[in-house]
Image: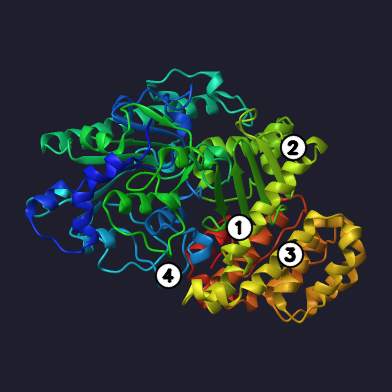
Amino acid sequence: MMNASIRYQTLMGIFFLTLLGCQMKNEKAIVDRPNIVWITSEDNSMHYLSMFHENGSPTPHIEFLAKEGIQYNRAFSNAPVCSVARSTLITGCYAPRIGAQYHRKIQKVPMPKDVEMFPQYLREAGYYTSNNSKEDYNLEKSDSVWDDSSKKASWRNRNEGQPFFHVHNIGVSHESSLHFDKDVVQSYDLKTEMDTSMVLPNHPNTHLFQFTNAYYRDKIIEMDERVGKVLSDLEADGLMDNTIIFYFGDHGGVLPGSKGYLYETGLHVPLVVYLPQQYREALSIEAGSQSNGFVQFIDFGPTVLNLSGIEIPKGMDGKPFLGQGVQWSEVEGRDETYSYADRFDEKYDMVRAVRKGNYKYIRSFQPFNHDGLRNNYRYKQLAYREWDSLYREGKLDEVEGAFFKPRPVELLYDVKEDPYETNNLAMESSYHSTLLDMRVRLQNWMIEKTDLSLYPEYLFIRDGGGDPVTFGQNHAKDIQRYLSIADLSLAIFDDVKEEIMKCLESTDALDRYWALTVCVGFGEEAVGLFPIIEEMAIKDEMGINRVRAAEALALAGNKNQEEHILTALYEAEEPAEALLMLNMMVLLEDGGADYQFNIDGKRLKEKVRASDEVQRRLLYLEVKI
């Protein structure tokens, strides 16, 4: 019914040829090309819009866009946080492949040699490119990307008759909207009625959580009103008949356990694409269509280029889901998406996930870093603080309290039957073949994409930050080996004990790092390796390995590791190095090891003390600098 047909190619070919020839012959050819607008709302998953979810708010302006185009029911951010998601969007590349996976960035990385930020290609082809106004890229941006990127940026500043690509960012739904105090809970007049059914099954069903859910849905209503203002401006300028409009959330969120986590509430975003009648006819698409094919953020840039008739660079990982040569049936057949979570502000972790169809596989590379590990910005939200307090008071059930406990190394969910991912199927024999299939898919993807997070961030910055893609390609065999060591955690300890021991004795420091990380995860099971680990806590040449060795011992009950950890911390030269150590120290204080560190802030290196992220950790640890 909606295939991109020969008819489409005939109708659209005239203005595509203009671009493909890279020369503009007349004004009509410029006018005929579609204008494209992105309207993005911050930090909201699809769960808050009634058109996508039964517990969502009405969003009549977004619903109008869908009625005149396509509603995508399976759209995913590849990352659950702003800078990493936006770095993925602007490049069409997986962030761990290009070194843009850390939030907030300690150091920007250069663009891959074979890719530019995609609006640059539009601009070179004659489009006016404007962004109002959030960028938040983890990459170095050239001056050729935007004609204007500011709070005043508008399509109205283009030359007469010039096609445009415009991004309009709506921040009212951002996480910070939930940084209210107790007075707001008592005095705010809600538009959305509080309802216990809104509270997720892994959250305590308290008055505060009910209020927070209703309050945030009020923000969604306000966000939709701002979408309506953009549409009014386009209508006033007579542009609705030749402008393709995307609306989407910039990633999921924002109630506790969503933004910053690879659960569906952190990744599954609302997406609709408005298509004026002339483009619906050209694409053979009916108004009000719905797509259940998987589309992901790596695909968005290539889709815009394709709709504009511009060749998609080979260095991009994504593929278009609309435009020339795209078959509706092929898009409907897409059923796979990959995602990643690394450092969020001062909180380190490394988690990867793949969803295929209704199954979701999550791999925790540091499962001892429980989800609830302190992140100062997250915990500005009252609901986070209440959740944490109730856990410490022993008032949560098993599902509600799982957020504050070490995770299994592997998680497997049927998200159709278990949409909020509370029932882990990984250990059930009837799902063993599914587990193995999903595991191998993720392993192969990480190897193919040369996942740079297998290097600790400070080493990546030092050795690979100047050209991440080339660094990954040159170290592909090392990355594969580090992954194979990390995956020893998937086995029974006694079956891999000897292999872990060999890795602990390796001359490669990162072989040792990942072997130690595996030992932390095994905990007391690794007691037979403790003599080696105890020596490493004192003598390993790499400071981060000494701290990880001490962490393994401390979490297994050894109470005498403070001196080794503090010595390594004071020797740390780089902020990301010290930050990783501080992350381990917070875990030892909050994660049941009953440690209390007395850090002398003045003994930290000056460069380390100057880091904003380090300062956040020190603030939580009550360290004066």
According to the picture, the residue beneath numbered tag 2 turns out to be 425
According to the picture, the residue beneath numbered tag 4 turns out to be 112
**How many callouts does the rendering have?**
4
Based on the displayed image, in which of its 4 quarters is residue 402 positioned? Answer: top right
Q: Distance from label 4 to label 2 (Cα)?
A: 39 Å
- Mark 2 is on which residue type? Leu
- Please say if the residues under marks 2 and 3 sit with CB atoms less than 8 Å apart: no
The residue nearer to you, when weighing 176 against 492, is: 492
The disc, 3 or 4, on the residue closer to the chain's N-terminal end is: 4
- Mark 1 is on which residue type? Trp
The disc, 1 or 3, on the residue closer to the chain's N-terminal end is: 1
Label 1 crowd (10 A; few <14 / some 14-19 / many >=20): some
Label 4 crowd (10 A; few <14 / some 14-19 / many >=20): many
- Please say if the residues under marks 4 and 1 sit with CB atoms less than 8 Å apart: no
The residue nearer to you, when weighing 455 against 601, is: 455
According to the picture, the residue beneath numbered tag 1 turns out to be 445
State the residue at coordinates (23%, 34%): 276
Spot occupied by residue 242 in the image (x, y as percentages of width and height) = 18, 40
State the residue at coordinates (93%, 64%): 528
The disc, 2 or 3, on the residue closer to the chain's N-terminal end is: 2
Query: Under tag 3, what secondary structure?
Result: helix
Spot occupied by residue 520 in the image (x, y as percentages of width and height) = 78, 60
